[in-house]
């Protein structure tokens, strides 16, 4: 039986078994089986249904469009492992019972290629990478990537992310078992530095992590102030003393 695995950027996720007779709507509306409150998603964003013996996804005139495997579509016939994006929602189509032609058979992505996509700032690739890790039984790293992604989108929202947030607590539990080099690589895939305590990303030039509270020092704080021989402390970027004019 075909099914959909979906995940929202705010961390919500679920599974839906597809029916050959009942369509699945994606959107903000109360009648949508895959639903989110995100403003990036239209009230009725897209529809997934059976058509001529195959499951298809069709955009319903959404504002931000529907994408499958990073290509904007109007209607698309699903193949096993296709990844659809509707605003903040990511939807994986799974149909392992259907025989695949060579063109449809998904090629397992190379980890280095996925990390290169992440380094370019592709959010969808982070979720694809988490799926890849899970398929290769690397459940701890898969969970780590998903938690970081959820935190990155939660920070800056209407509610502050506190130190007792379940996602930060879980990151701290996972961190000791995961190599620091890999955690740094994942964190540095976006602008910023990894927090030494929770592993979340901090914005550039911030001395303290914006996810933890109380906030610990991050890995790379801005350079210290320059102290002149006259005793005055100057900004780290100053070339001459603001008091006596001496070269620094």
Image (cartoon, rainbow, N blue to C red):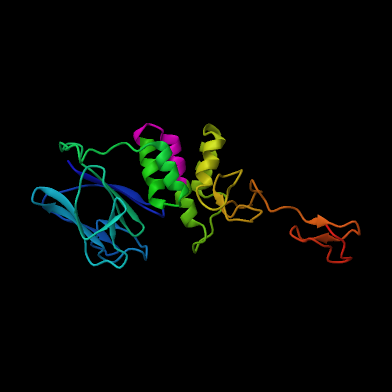
Residues drawn in magenta: 135-147
In screen coordinates, is 174 left or right of 221? left
| Residue located at (44% from left, 42% from top) | 115
Percent x, y for residue 152?
A: 49, 53
38 up-or-down from 138: above or below = below
In screen coordinates, is 88 left or right of 184? left
| Residue located at (37% from left, 66% from top) | 39
Whether residue 146 is visible to the viewer of this picture, yes or no, is: no
**Magenta stretch secondary structure, dominant:** helix
Whether residue 204 is visible to the viewer of this picture, yes or no, is: yes
In the picture, the quarter occupied by the N terminus is: top left
In the picture, the quarter occupied by the C terminus is: bottom right
Q: Nearer the viewer, residue 156 or 205?
A: 205
In screen coordinates, is 102 left or right of 218? left
* Residue most extreme to the left: 52
Percent x, y for residue 175?
A: 54, 37
Residue 170 belongs to magenta span: no
Q: Quadrant of residue 132?
A: top left
Q: Nearer the viewer, residue 117 or 31?
A: 117
How many marks are shown on the rendered structure? 0
Percent x, y for residue 111?
A: 41, 37
17 up-or-down from 139: above or below = below
Q: Nearer the viewer, residue 57 or 245?
A: 245
50 up-or-down from 244: above or below = above
Q: Quadrant of residue 140?
A: top left
Percent x, y for residue 46?
A: 23, 60
């Amino acid at each position: 039986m075909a099914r959909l695995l979906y995940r929202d950027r705010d961390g919500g996720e679920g599974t839906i078994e597809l029916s050959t007779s009942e369509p699945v709507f994606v959107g903000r509306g109360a009648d949508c089986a895959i639903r989110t409150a995100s403003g990036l998603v239209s009230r009725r964003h897209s529809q997934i249904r059976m058509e001529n013996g195959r499951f298809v996804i069709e955009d319903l005139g959404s504002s931000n469009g529907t994408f499958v495997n990073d290509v904007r579509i109007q209607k698309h016939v699903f193949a096993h492992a296709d990844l659809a994006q509707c605003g903040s929602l990511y939807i994986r189509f799974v149909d392992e019972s259907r025989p695949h032609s060579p063109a449809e058979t998904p090629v397992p992505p190379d980890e280095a290629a996925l990390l290169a996509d992440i380094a370019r700032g592709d959010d969808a690739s982070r979720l694809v990478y988490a799926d890849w890790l899970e398929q290769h039984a690397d459940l701890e790293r898969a969970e780590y990537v998903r938690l970081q992604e959820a935190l990155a989108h939660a920070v800056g929202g209407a509610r502050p992310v506190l130190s007792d947030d379940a996602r930060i607590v879980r990151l701290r539990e996972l961190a000791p078992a995961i190599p620091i080099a890999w955690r740094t690589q994942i964190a540095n895939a976006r602008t910023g530095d990894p927090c030494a305590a929770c592993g979340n990303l901090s914005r550039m030039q911030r001395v303290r992590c914006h996810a933890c509270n109380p906030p610990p020092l991050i890995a790379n704080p801005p350079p210290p102030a320059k102290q002149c021989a006259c005793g005055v402390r100057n900004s780290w970027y100053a070339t001459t003393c603001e008091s006596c004019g001496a070269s620094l």
